[in-house]
Amino acid sequence: MTEPGPEERIDATFRNGSLTAAGIILGFSLSFISRWVSNPNDWSRIDIVPMLLLTIGIALQVKVFADLLARDSLIAAKYDRARRLFLIGLSVVAVGIGVALVNDILGLGSMPILGGGSVG
């Protein structure tokens, strides 16, 4: 049997670029949900679906951001896992925004995305 070699590592500069990109996208996601939630309109049941998707996606992005800040994120396997998880979180957020947009276009939800609002 041969001794296993040291775990493959990535360059810190490469990881830092990924950390910056993840932080910017996370900031956008948080800004979007904050603006959407602060809308004064009443919520309807259909609004729960995009809200759950947005919350789950943002939670995944926050986890990845924390994972990329860890010292062991320079290990290639851990970096690759974080990258995959971030893409999943980003996709879930995108689906949540898409569902909210479709709800808004079809007039199903009470929380408008397109800037319209109920006139009361």
Image: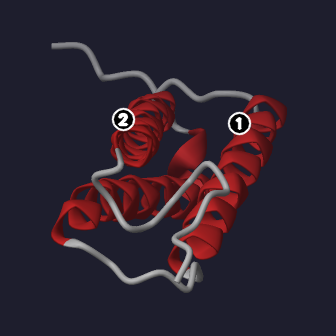
Residue density around tag 2, few if under 14, some if 14–19, many if 20 or more, within 10 Å: some
Residue 29 coordinates in the image, percent (x, y)? 60, 56
Residue type at numbered disc 1:
Ser
Q: Residue at x 51, y 37 (%)?
A: 75
The number of callouts visible is 2
Q: Residue at x 25, y 73 (%)?
A: 44
The image position of residue 67, as x and y in percent, is 50, 57
Reading the image, the residue beneath label 1 is 18
51 or 117, which is in the foreground? 117
To which quarter of the image does residue 77 belong? top left
Query: Is 14 above or below relative to 90?
Result: above
The mark found on residue 88 in the picture is 2
Please state, as top left, top right, bottom left or bottom right, where the N terminus lies in the image.
top left
Secondary structure of the residue carrying tag 2 is helix
Q: Nearer the viewer, residue 23 or 19?
A: 23
Position of residue 83 measured from the top left corner of the image (x, y, whole percent): 49, 33
In terms of depth relative to the viewer, which is nearer, 9 or 117?
A: 117
Q: Does 51 sit left or right of 62 as displayed? A: left
Q: As displayed, is residue 26 above or below residue 81?
A: below
